[in-house]
Amino acid sequence: MSQQNREQWGTRAGFLLAAIGSAVGLGNIWRFPYVAYENGGGAFLVPYLVALLTAGIPLLILEYAVGHRYRASPPAAFRRLARPAEALGWWQVGICFVISVYYAVIVAWAVRYAGFSVTQAWGEDTEAFLFGDFLGVAEAPGAITSYNPGVLVPLVLIWIVVLVVLALGVRRGIEWANRIFIPLLAVLFLVLVVQALFLDGAEIGLDAFFAPDWSAITDGSVWVAAYGQIFFTLSVGFGIMITYASYLRRKSDLPGSALVAGFANSSFELLAGIGVFATLGFMAASANVPIEEVATSGLGLAFVVFPQIINTIPIAPALFGLLFFVSLVVAGMTSLISIVEVVVSSVRDRTGMGRLPAVLVVGGLIAVVSIAVFPTDQGLYLLDASDHFINQYGIALAALVIVIVLAWLLRSMPSLRGHLATYSSVPLRVWWAVTLGVVTPIVLGWMMWDSLSTEFAQNYEDYPTWFLNSAGWGVAIGVIVIAVLISLIPWKRRAGDDDDSNATVAAADDSGRGQ
């Protein structure tokens, strides 16, 4: 797929909706509210905003610049920067492969729970229903002994929708899907939040969420949590934004687009916090317990606590449940589509496959792995371990290495800044290079050190060492090893892959200026 024949977004709005759809995912709804609550409440918004401006948006701009300038998915784009850097791109592809195989199953759970919410089929003991009746989780990690058709059916449907959207292409598939999904998600969640605000006790939850603990500002761990949330919520480190930016027209305002996408994502997180904590306040008031006893995050919040809340809502509980779980499905779908597109686009760039064959072969392979592994009695253990290690030692570590390589080893910042300045409505001064070259590496490096210290002190979730070595460390390290091996394959020379990448890019830039 040459640069000249590369697919393009129909409009800038289509790209922005797709970028926002990728960033707005399950973590916005079930991770941010609890992180903010645990780290100073309203005061957390100060380090969060600082992290957004000094790391999140600069990283978004960097990935936009790489994808847009080199007109390629991560492996090909990094290859055009420097031949050895291609492994960085395949590392991101491997991360996307791993995440997509388990992310889809969470979306499938949300599909089933949207149906369960109509009759509150989960009963009174929502935790026992989730882990026992619905998932049939084994007592401990081990060999797969049973298969769960209740998860299989919605998972197959999810993959059919994803593959159809990707097969239709960038403009007719991904762009149009996000034109439908993002407005739908906004409407669904606004209705959900309004309904939550009228619940008895909502003010208790909102007070817990927004009441500022200004002493938290001086706590270093709070700042690390803020930067960690920004890194994990903006889809940086996956290669998604490199891929999406490669489909932009030449005359595109990249810094302006990054600002819109970054603030739109953060606005949705804030809205999610209001909705979630208003609802938790209702639960705390109903049970006559402190808010800290019901506040949680992750799978427990979505599939245990919220069903408990729905059980006690006096008016239209089925509607509340539908709004919440359909919102999870929509948010998850937009992110899943973007994650799989990275893998499909990368294989296309390196092999020359057409979109439909690539979607069927590559997307089909991801779907088969997902369907074969996760609707089982071991699925939750594999999901938990893989998610933890690929996030901590995949996404964050990849972002750290890429920033160091581009800023300090290849010294690519001046050329990328020059490319951005051509069409930018927002001037990129020295702050962009300083934040990426100094602030981001220091924060990410500290996060890695802190995380590794915790990891070696105690097994994650007290899982057996053999299990963590295979499903956790094995997955994270295996992705890096495979990425290096793939980058060493002597691929057939293709148009746009010349080692003289500067000449290729310069020619493309000149043609862009002539439009």
Image (cartoon, rainbow, N blue to C red):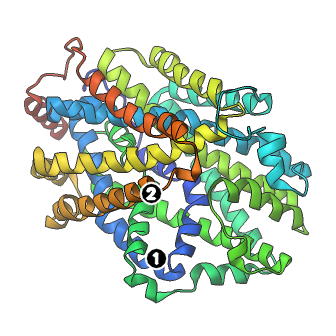
Q: Residues within 10 Å of mark 1 (few under 14, many from 20)?
A: some
Q: Which mark is residue 457?
A: 2
- As helix, strand or loop, the secondary structure at mark 2 comes to helix
Q: Which residue is mark 1?
A: 45
Residue 298 location, x and y as percent?
62, 56
| Vertical side of 279 occupied by 471: above or below | above
Q: Amino acid at mark 1?
A: Leu
> At x 69% / y 68%, what residue is drawn?
193
Instruction: Tell how many labels.
Output: 2
Q: Residues within 10 Å of mark 2 (few under 14, many from 20)?
A: few
Task: Find residue 105 and report its image quarter.
Answer: top right
Q: Which mark is residue 313?
A: none
Residue 224 location, x and y as percent?
38, 68
| Vertical side of 302 occupied by 5: above or below | above
Quarter of the figure that contains the C terminus: top left
> At x 78% / y 41%, what residue is drawn?
112
Task: Find residue 110 and report its image quarter.
Answer: top right
In primary-sequence order, the first of circles 1 and 2 is 1
Can residue 81 be seen?
yes
